Amino acid sequence: MHLLLRTLMLLVTSRRRPPLSLWGTSSLKLRVLPTDIDIALHVNNGMYFSLMDLGRFDLMVRAGMWDRMRARGWSPVVNLETITFRRSLTLWQAYTIETRIIAFDEKAIFFEQRMVAGGEIYARAYLATRLVSKSGPVANEEIFAETGRPPADLVLPEFLHRWREENALPSTRRPAPHLW
């Protein structure tokens, strides 16, 4: 909810920015706002993921995929994410969110996102995402029918394959009991 206005504004302003290929890189310029920081006066660790949503929306809108997804009743969801922090972004600091799709597997679309300031990476995240409809997950073949086939060099790196396998929870169709 805290980024709702920013997200709505981005969905409008991204349409005015130059178009991108879905397989290209979105570079979204932002500034750290008071609502982004915590008591230590830097961007809160959880806020990085919320801000990175904006980068993915920018890529989807500029590549024309956002309208096609919405027309088909598809919604993006994050299945798995990990982030590494290198430096802290602080109040009023300018930075960019760099976003690109790096791979597909049978279940997910993988993104790499970076927070960059002054030419330096401050944080890097990898996300496994899905498109879902009312009837469940959208198959890759349906996605590719809308987007075209991904470039041949989009191959899932082995470390991301292992990360996904080692951290996956059971399907929603199977039990996942909470036992410590």
Image (cartoon, rainbow, N blue to C red):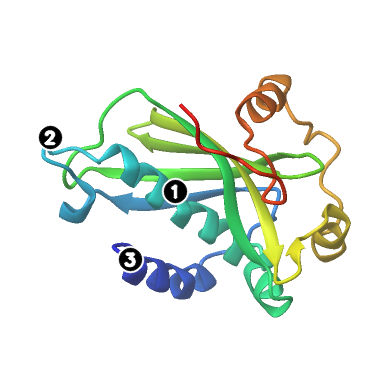
Q: Which residue is mark 2?
A: 40
Task: Identify the image quadrant of the C terminus.
Answer: top left
Quick check: marks 2 and 1 in contact, CB under 8 Å? no
**Residue 152 relative to residue 42: left or right:** right
CA gap between label 1 and label 3 equals: 15 Å
Q: Position of residue 166 (x, y in %)?
A: 64, 24
Which residue is drawn at the image coordinates 39% and 36% (left, top)? Answer: 116
* Residue type at tag 2: Ala
Secondary structure of the residue carrying numbered label 1: helix
Q: Residue 52, labelled with which disc?
A: 1
Mark nearer the N terminus (2 vs 1): 2
Position above or below: 60 against 112 = below
**Residue 2 relative to residue 177: left or right:** left
Quadrant in the picture for residue 139:
bottom right
Q: Residue furthest bottom?
A: 71
Q: Which residue is mark 3?
A: 1
